[in-house]
Amino acid sequence: MKVLFVCTGNACRSPLADALLKKYRPDIDVESAGTYPYYKVVELTRRYAQKEGVEELLKNVPDGLQSKDLNEYDVIVAMESEHEAAIIRQNPNCADKIEVWHINDPYNQPFKQACHEFDRIKSKVAHMAKSIKQ
C-alpha cells in the first residue's frame, strides 16, 4: 500500500499527514508533495508534530508533485479541490485514486487557529489508518 498526501507548499498539511500516518501505520509506504513546494516545512507544523510525538517522522525538505510518479500510489489525498485538479492535470488516470479532504491552509494562522486544521488532519489520518487494509 502506498499513499501520497498533496497540498500547496508541502510545508504544513501534507507533511503532517505524512508523519502521522507513518506513526499510526508504519507498515504503509507514505509520502507527501506540494503543487508549489516551499523551501522548508514551517515552524507551525514542526510545533504541532512535536506535540503529537511525530517530529522525527516529519520531512525536512518539501517535495514537488511533479517529481512523483502518480501511478505508484494506491491512494492520493488532496487537501483541497485545487490540489485534486493539479493531480488530474499531471495524470488523468489517477482520478479514481484521489480523496479530497477540504482542509484549509493554516500557513499564516496563529498556532491556536492552525491547530484546528491540524486536529482535522489528525482525525482524518487516524480514520484512514484504521480503514486501510494491508
Image: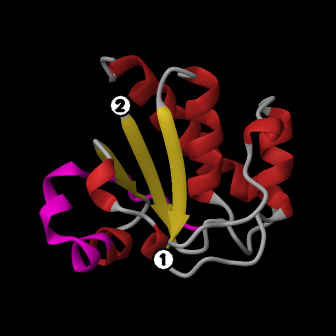
Q: Nearer the viewer, residue 93 or 112?
A: 93
- Residue 34: x and y in percent read 53, 70
Residue 11 horizontal side relative to residue 132, left or right: right
Q: Is residue 61 left or right of residue 18?
A: right
Rendered location of residue 88, percent (x, y) = 22, 72
Say which residue appears at 26% left-offset and 56% top-offset. 71
Q: N-terminal of the two: label 2 or label 1?
A: 2
Q: Secondary structure at mark 1?
A: loop
Q: Residue at x 55, y 82 (%)?
A: 36
Residue 58 in the image: x percent, y percent? 74, 46
Q: Is residue 20 above or below residue 12?
A: above
Q: What residue is rendered at 53% in x and 22% in y? A: 25
Mark 1 and mark 2 in contact (Cβ < 8 Å)? no
Q: Which residues are drawn in magenta? A: 87-105
Indicate the position of residue 100 as horizontal and vertical percent values.
32, 56
Q: Amino acid at mark 1?
A: Thr
Quarter of the image that includes the C terminus: top left
Residue marked by disc 2? 1
Q: Is residue 101 magenta?
A: yes
Which one is nearer the viewer's eye here, 58 or 109? 58
Q: Few, some or many C-alpha atoms within 10 Å of disc 2 (few <14, some 14-19, many ≥20)?
A: few
Residue annotated with mark 1: 35
Q: Regarding mark 2 in the picture, which secondary structure is present there?
A: loop
Which residue occupies the foreground of this view, 1 or 106? 1
